[in-house]
Image (cartoon, rainbow, N blue to C red):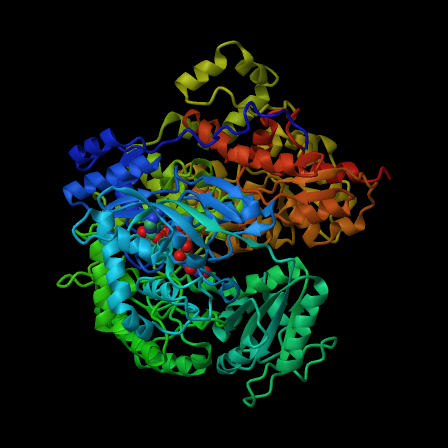
Amino acid sequence: MATEPREDPADDRRANYDYASDDVDRPALVADLEDRVEGDVRFDSYSRELYATDASAYELTPIGVVFPRSTDDVAAVVEYCAYREIPVLPRGGGTSLAGQTVNRAVVLDFTRYMNDVVAVAPDDREATVQPGAILGSLNERLATHDLKFAPDPAWGDKSAIGGAIGNNSTGSHSLQYGKTDAYIDSCEVVLADGTRTEFGEVTLSEIAKRADPDGDLEARIYAEIERILEEDADAIGEAYPDLKRNVSGYNLDRLVCEARGEPLPGDEETGEAGTVNLARLLAGSEGTLAIVTEATVSLEPVPATKSVALLCYGGLHEAMADVENVLAHDPAAVEVLDDVLIDLARGTAEFGPVTGILPDGTNAVLLVEFYASGPEEGRDRVADLLADRVPDADPEGEPAEEIPDGGDPIAVDALEAYDAEERATFWKLRKSGLPILLSRTTDEKHVSFIEDTAVPPESLPEFLEGFEEILESYDTYASFYAHAGPGVLHVRPLINTKTEFGLDQLHGIADEVTDLVVELGGSVSGEHGDGRARTQWNRKLYGEGVWEAFRGLKTAFDPDWLLNPGQVVYREGDPTDLREHLRFSPDYEFESGFEPALEWDNDNGMQGMVELCHGCGGCRGDQETTGGVMCPTFRASREEITSTRGRANALRSAMDGDLEPGEAFSDEFVEEVMDLCIGCKGCAIDCPSEVDMAKLKAEVTHEYHQRNGATFRDELFARVEELSKWGSALAPLSNLAPKVPGARKLMEATVGIATDRSLPTFHRETFEDWFDERGVSAVDPHEADRRVVLYPDTYTNYSNPAAGRAAVRVLEAAGVHVAVPDVSDTGRPAFSKGFLDRARETAEENVDALSPAVEAGYDVVVVEPSDAVMLQSDYLDLLSGEAVRELAANSYGICEYVDRFDLDGRLEFEAPGTALAYHGHCHQKAAARDHHAVGVLRRAGYAVDPLDSGCCGMAGSFGYEAEHASMSEAIGSVLYDQVEASPGERVVAPGASCRTQLGDRPGAEAKPPTPIELVAAALSAE
Ligand SMILES: Cc1cc2nc3c(=O)[nH]c(=O)nc-3n(C[C@H](O)[C@H](O)[C@H](O)COP(=O)(O)OP(=O)(O)OC[C@H]3O[C@@H](n4cnc5c(N)ncnc54)[C@H](O)[C@@H]3O)c2cc1C
Ligand code: SF4
Ligand code: SF4
């Protein structure tokens, strides 16, 4: 879509927002660090709480956070901290699951500034990257060369290369690619004393030359490596399990195998004997040996074709017993899904259709993916697998009706997927149940602490049996899923760590499962690393000899144990215990300090919601790589405090005593944490736990108003209905007033309304006026099969009556009787601004006004999406009872209504053929109702490109507020890019705010139309 070019497309368009709290702990330390670094230094209480957790069950407030801009900054911080004996913790996306990014330390967050892809050398299949570069963005950049960074951790679109090195990450395709260590060519690092150096390939003779036990830090590191290779190599060879995936402990088996020129466990080849790559020793070291400031990694070609088979089994045990047989076909991935997750997927609208075609009695599936050089080979490989593992299935026939009980561990049926969309559906199915597991608001949660053990694939049946017995003996359960091919099962037992009993379960289960793993020749961690959850078991896994080698290595690299201490290995006398520093422990206390004003019908009420975020960092993904709505403010500013996770962590800290009592209702908290949430509800749908931050914001803002009163501007925006009524009565004068020279400046200075924003214009003849003027309805209510009350929402009524008229035209053309009720606004503005009592009053009035019509069989239809969703869902948060439930169940957005009842099937269209870019409203996306307009527009004859867009950034009044203008524009620019990249010639959007934002797009001639106007325009003249 053509528009004016930006002044400089390379400009950093992040929101002009830098969080800086007044309240700084340890000011002398801050001053010293600020003197030494160019980056940001934050030691205020909010920042510290934001970095107190990761995706694990752990929480420990760090000393402070530094955002380095360069290797010099990193070296300066580390040198200074070494001198002051302060621990340091490097961090990427903070998506670790074992607690390795949680420590009492100065945190170095690399994702803010040190996140560049420095160079790509496609011919050498190599890229050089800074540690904060997100894997998804790196791969996007590499895609033009048909290359990729091959290890594929599931959260690669939110996690960084430094974290992948720190955890030696890998993902579903580890059978094909192995782990991150295999791809590290060299690293620039900062050592524990601040020395900058480079690690890469080095011969043993060079190591000997550099080694000096009495020399500087680097010389002492070489000396210890030489010692380990000479003295501990045999013990290491014996102690490490023979597994493709083992990330427990330090990467000493690779060091030894490389030195000897022997293949690694899992048969990965190493090079010539006598050469080792010391950069690879850092893989899996979890920030405890050195800090990576730049890495050169090797790349793999993107496979030409993929094909997928979903093998169906009667039970998990049969599936596990079949893994070895499946592996004989050399697949790129073998993933498992058990009955718990299949049942959860069955209950969802998205996956019901896929699970629906699984034969009855399918209680486990193996997803098997092949890479191939072309479609034919892809099909052949699936056919070979099916001939072997599903001999009775007819590939062309219907799925089996039922799975026979017991018997041979052979799959009884299979589904196949060859095109990208089908394959994506199967992969999504594999991941579908987890969000539901993680959306528990009870005190019992599916805790990750023993969730990634690895065993040889042939031991999976025995492991499963033993694991199930252990869980039963501890009176709990879990589901089993993930990477069956390399023997890595994800298992998260349900435990309440707020009780002593829960802590006993935690420790007892971990102890017994690690015994089982060791007995079966497995590893304590095959994927997520040691951290706080697993470090203590490394001693059991490897034995005293290797444990001492770990300590020797750690001491050589970090003589004072200041780099992320207590992870991977601990100091004698200071053991790491998985029960310490839990986010929820028996000592945990929660006090919200107020009575919630909204209905919270989930377990544990509002507290359950405040505690729901499990810290995965899913809300930190970019629009380009992650898509969806969540979280636009993070996408615009790349500040943790503006992510859903940041807000959730801050809010919980304000209510569990980590921040000052009452902090949640301070000016600072409301301004910095809550105000910047634009209430788009993206998190309510896109977050795996469905954290509803918009609702929490409404509660906190409401309570803030109770305690501190509201600003004039908030009152003004909350009463936009009255304002619009006046605007309309005084039009066109009211539309001219802001154009008087100086008027907008005055508005900004006095009320805080941004100067550059287009204000809504008002129509003298409102939609209601027009409708009344028509007199009788065009369709007799007694002859119509559907009857509708068309809600005159504020925006449609006063500012865009054309959309209301279009809605009437389409509905009546389809034979629907239309009436317009006598109601006020829906209460949306008051709700969004945190005036919940007022919103409730309005909701009550509207329920009273509309219920008789609903009882009489009328449906309620709304043009403005946020008002439609107000009736459909937010009213249920404000009110209880049958009447509001009935109203919610019978309310629809206009295109939703047309689509749901096939009304467009009754209409004749003159195919307009225009290509459209469609931007849906975020509230409708959150309610899974935004797709209807696309279907209706297509059937009306338009070619529609539905954008995978987030919130537009206007978000009601947000974009008008002067202090939020830069954030709003930065969010908008993400949408602008999508519109520009779309083949659509014209953009269409149902929401008033979105249309304003899109109307302000550089080069845009006017606000885009609403879908219903285009549908009406396409109606045949007859
Ligand atoms: C839903 C979900 C799914 C996941 N799936 C997978 C998966 O499939 N496979 C997998 O392997 N993991 C997975 N993980 C775990 C995690 O996402 C990965 O291990 C990821 O690679 C960590 O990257 P990060 O940027 O978040 O690192 P962080 O969590 O920030 O850090 C990880 C470790 O690396 C260290 N580190 C970070 N930067 C540096 C640096 N510059 N120098 C030295 N050390 C550094 C840190 O100190 C820490 O010990 C998953 C996590 C979640 C929440
Ligand atoms: S808000 Fe949701 S997506 Fe973000 S970290 Fe928390 S659980 Fe993950
Ligand atoms: S409501 Fe929107 S802006 Fe607010 S936290 Fe959720 S996704 Fe982010």
Considering the image in quadrants, where does the N terminus appear?
A: top right
Give coordinates of residue 931: x percent, y percent. 64, 49
Q: Name the quadrant where ligand 3 sits.
A: top left
- Residue 76 vertical placement versus 550 (above, below): above
Q: Residue furthest right?
A: 1022
Question: In the rendered image, which quarter is residue 441 located in?
Answer: bottom left
Number of numbered labels in the structure image: 0
Give coordinates of residue 676: x percent, y percent. 40, 36
Give coordinates of residue 308: x percent, y percent. 62, 67
**Residue sitting at x 67%, y 62%:** 373
Q: Residue furthest top?
A: 741
Question: In the rendered image, which quarter is residue 404 located in?
Answer: bottom right
- Residue 908 vertical placement versus 257 (above, below): above
Q: Is residue 668 left or right of residue 396?
A: left
Q: Is residue 61 visible?
A: no
**Front position in the image: 178 or 651:** 178
Give coordinates of residue 529: x percent, y percent. 35, 61
Question: In the rendered image, which quarter is residue 452 located in?
Answer: bottom left
**Front position in the image: 6 or 966:** 6
Q: Is residue 932 visible?
A: yes
- Residue 879 vertical placement versus 2 (above, below): below
Considering the image in quadrants, where does the C terminus appear?
A: top right
Q: Is residue 724 left or right of residue 575?
A: right
